Image (tube, grey):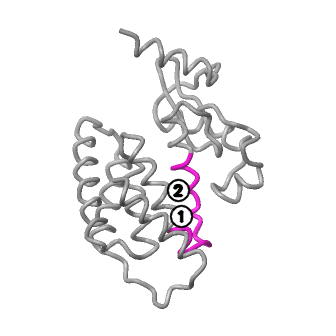
Amino acid sequence: MTSILFVLLLAAAGTASVAEPFKPTDNPELAQLFRQDQADRDAADIDWNAVGPRDQARKARVQALLEAGVVRSAADHYHAAMVFQHGDSLADYRLANALATLAMAQAPDDSHYRWLVGASWDRLLMRQLQPQWYGTQYKGDAKGLYLYPVAKDAVTDEERKAMVGHTLAEELAHVAEAAKEMGLPVRAAAPTIEELRRESTTSEAP
């Protein structure tokens, strides 16, 4: 995993400075894996016990395609990134961010690719109990849904708008709509990052 991530980052750096001599053809299997990933999340009643094993199988297949060197186009990297964005480890989120960054480097005008760069970075930070930058990640508990804590000054609202399409105020206003879509209440007072860290320490204590 680490070696693949290193190669991807080197490729991203090269893509940013050297024009591609040709446009790679999109990989149809990656496109299909992406469609399956999205379909699992578009269902009215999601059975996460069933989705989890499918996510793992998709991740394993994308890993094999990466190792085979057949992930080439901007869309390929985006599709692969989304599968790893729905992984469950720090390594998955790092790879998702690297893949999304490469997709954005190949097609910088595509808003979907830019959004996933921001969202994967937010998820990577959240996994490490750090405040997110762009405001793409929600959390839910017994008290309801809330926007995961944001490092408000990490980037400007103009940078948030450019990367993920919204300001922080717009995302905060969207919490109620997102909660309704998920069938959850809105948590009256969202926890701070310090509170979340204390909760994590408590839950991990023997």
Quick one: SS at disc 1? Answer: helix
**What's the magenta bit mostly, secondary-structure-wise?**
helix
Task: Give the vertical position of 54 relative to 180 (above or below).
Answer: below
Q: Is residue 122 magenta?
A: no
Disc 1 versus disc 2: distance between alpha carbons?
5 Å
- On the image, the x and y values in percent for residue 109 come to 62, 72
Quadrant of the image for the C terminus?
top left
The residue beneath circle 2 is: 116
- On the image, the x and y values in percent for residue 110 come to 57, 70
> Along the horizontal axis of the image, is 36 left or right of 6?
left
Instruction: Tell me the kind of residue under disc 1.
Output: Tyr
Mark 1: give few (<14), some (14-19) or many (20+) Cα within 10 Å: many
> Along the horizontal axis of the image, is 155 left or right of 75?
right
Quick one: SS at disc 2? Answer: helix
Asked if labels 2 and 1 touch by Cβ distance under 8 angstroms, the answer is yes
Mark 2: give few (<14), some (14-19) or many (20+) Cα within 10 Å: many
Q: Is residue 107 magenta?
A: yes
Q: Residue at x 54, y 15 (%)?
A: 198
Picture quadrant of residue 90: top left
The residue beneath circle 1 is: 113
Residue range (magenta): 103-121
Q: Residue at x 49, y 90 (%)?
A: 21
Picture quadrant of residue 18: bottom right
Task: Give the vertical position of 119 relative to 147 (above or below).
Answer: below
Instruction: Tell me the kind of residue under disc 2.
Output: Leu
Q: Residue at x 59, y 74 (%)?
A: 16
